[in-house]
Image (cartoon, rainbow, N blue to C red):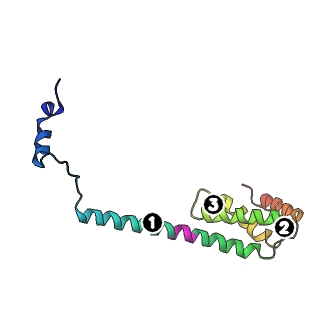
Amino acid sequence: MTTPNEIYPAFVDKLSHHGSRLEPVRAPSHILAGVAVAATVLSFSGAAVAQSDIERQAQCELSAIRDTRSPLAVQYIRSACNWLVVNSDSLLNESSKGYYVCLVRQLSGAQSNEAAAAIMSACRASNPL
């Protein structure tokens, strides 16, 4: 039976250089430092973007929900604010934007679910998806 050392003699030379002990390969410290800096920058920039989206959604909800008594209106305001934040930069969804803006503006202050349903219907009719 042949051993790996007989098939790959160069491998034996690499191992015999360090004796019988195998030592781990170490990356140069400047490469490790660069990777650490890149990971830190990426994690902070991702958190900053997520935080600004959360803040934008919260501002949208705060501006619209303040005097709203209808649970249905509150639910649709939150959903519309989320849609507006997530799709704010998308040109593909530009045709739907008017509907969600209408919901946020017109549902604000709705006092009953019946009123909210009528407002949602009117927004849908005036801004077909």
Tag count in the figure? 3
Q: Nearer the viewer, residue 40 or 73?
A: 40
Q: Which residues are magenta?
A: 48-52
Q: Which residue is mark 2?
A: 70
Say what secondary structure mark 3 lies in: helix
The reply to whether dot 2 and dot 1 touch (C-beta < 8 Å) is: no
Specify the quadrant of the image occupied by residue 80.
bottom right
CA gap, disc 3 and disc 2? 28 Å
- Please say if the residues under marks 1 and 3 sit with CB atoms less than 8 Å apart: no
Side of 128 relative to 30 (left or right): right
Residue carrying label 1 = 43
Task: Give the image quarter of residue 74.
Answer: bottom right
Q: Main secondary structure of the magenta part?
A: helix
Q: Residue at x 74, y 56 (%)?
A: 128
Q: Is residue 26 visible?
A: yes
Task: Reply yes or no: does residue 41 show up in magenta.
Answer: no
Q: Which mark is residue 94?
A: 3
Q: Earlier in the sequence, mark 1 or mark 3?
A: 1
Kind of residue sitting beneath label 1: Ser
**Which residue in the rendered view is the most extreme toward the top?**
1
Q: SS at mark 1?
A: helix
Q: Earlier in the sequence, mark 3 or mark 2?
A: 2
Q: Between tags 3 and 2, which lies in front? A: 2
| Relative to 36, 7 lies left or right | left
Residue 77 quadrant: bottom right
Q: Position of residue 108 (x, y in %)?
A: 79, 72
State the image coordinates of residue 15 (x, y, percent, origin top left): 14, 44
- Decide if residue 87 is in sight here: no
